[in-house]
């Protein structure tokens, strides 16, 4: 994960805070912090395959991640798998919805699932299974407000794309 002091992490935090407050009216620091941390965690892409099967292979299909969660021997592992499913579905639904067709393409175990519904369900389950009681309220809120957070992430993406364009444009004219 990118450290909180890294400029990219600070950029995501600032964009998320601004977007969620100004466009969505959401000023909850724990929710906004969770979403900005999600962006910083998924950017390097290694965390996308965080849930692994019994043979240690990374899982990239939601249904396989859910199966891994349900087969886990302990509650903590189930909770972490469900949290990851929530994070995975929120990231793709909010940041790159155009990729959902490919993720749920022909031959994929995920072709018949609804990422939003599964994300909401997984965050709810994670909120009931989390070993850390201070995580439970934000996970429950992510379940309750999944669609709002996904929309917020899409707005954050628009903001960083504007910044990217401005930086490119500035370099062209410099």
Image (cartoon, rainbow, N blue to C red):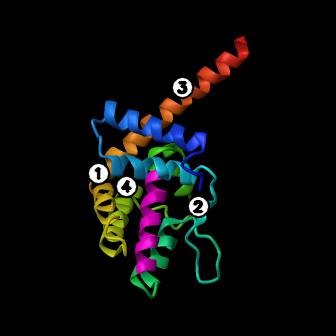
Q: Earlier in the sequence, mark 4 or mark 2?
A: 2
Residue that carries the numbered disc 4 in the rendered image: 116
**Mark 1–mark 2 distance (CA, rounded to whole Å):** 23 Å
**Mark 1–mark 4 distance (CA, rounded to whole Å):** 10 Å
**Mark 4–mark 2 distance (CA, rounded to whole Å):** 20 Å
Q: Quadrant of residue 20?
A: top left
- Please tell me whether mark 1 sits on a helix, a strand or a loop: loop
Horizontal side of 120 relative to 169 (left or right) equals left
Q: Residue furthest bottom?
A: 73
Residue at (45% x, 71% y) in the render = 80
Stretch of the chain drawn in magenta? 76-91
Name the mark on residue 162: 3
Q: Are marks 1 and 4 in contact (CB under 8 Å)?
A: no
Determine if the magenta segment contains residue 112. no
Q: In terms of depth relative to the viewer, which is nearer, 45 or 60?
A: 45
Q: In terms of depth relative to the viewer, which is nearer, 112 or 95?
A: 95
**Mark 4–mark 3 distance (CA, rounded to whole Å):** 26 Å
Residue that carries the numbered disc 2 in the rendered image: 47
- Please tell me whether mark 2 sits on a helix, a strand or a loop: helix
Q: Residue furthest top?
A: 173
Q: Are marks 4 and 2 in contact (CB under 8 Å)?
A: no
Camera-nearest label, 1 or 4: 1
Horizontal side of 140 relative to 69 (left or right) equals left
Q: Residues within 10 Å of mark 4 (few under 14, many from 20)?
A: some
Q: Earlier in the sequence, mark 1 or mark 3?
A: 1
């Amino acid at each position: 994960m990118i450290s909180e002091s890294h400029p990219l992490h600070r950029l995501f935090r600032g964009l998320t805070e601004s977007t969620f407050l100004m466009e969505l009216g959401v000023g909850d620091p724990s929710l906004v912090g969770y979403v900005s941390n999600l962006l910083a965690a998924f950017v390097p892409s290694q965390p996308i395959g965080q849930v692994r099967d019994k043979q240690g292979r990374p899982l990239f299909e939601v249904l396989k991640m859910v199966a891994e969660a349900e087969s886990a021997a302990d509650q903590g592992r189930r909770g972490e798998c469900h949290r990851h499913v929530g994070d995975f579905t929120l990231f793709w639904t909010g940041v790159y919805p155009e990729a959902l067709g490919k993720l749920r393409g022909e031959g994929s175990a995920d072709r018949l699932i609804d990422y939003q519904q599964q994300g909401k369900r997984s965050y709810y389950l994670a909120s009931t299974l989390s070993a850390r009681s201070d995580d439970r309220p934000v996970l429950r809120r992510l379940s309750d407000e999944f669609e709002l957070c996904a929309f917020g992430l899409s707005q954050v993406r628009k903001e960083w794309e504007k910044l990217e364009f401005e930086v490119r444009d500035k370099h062209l004219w410099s």
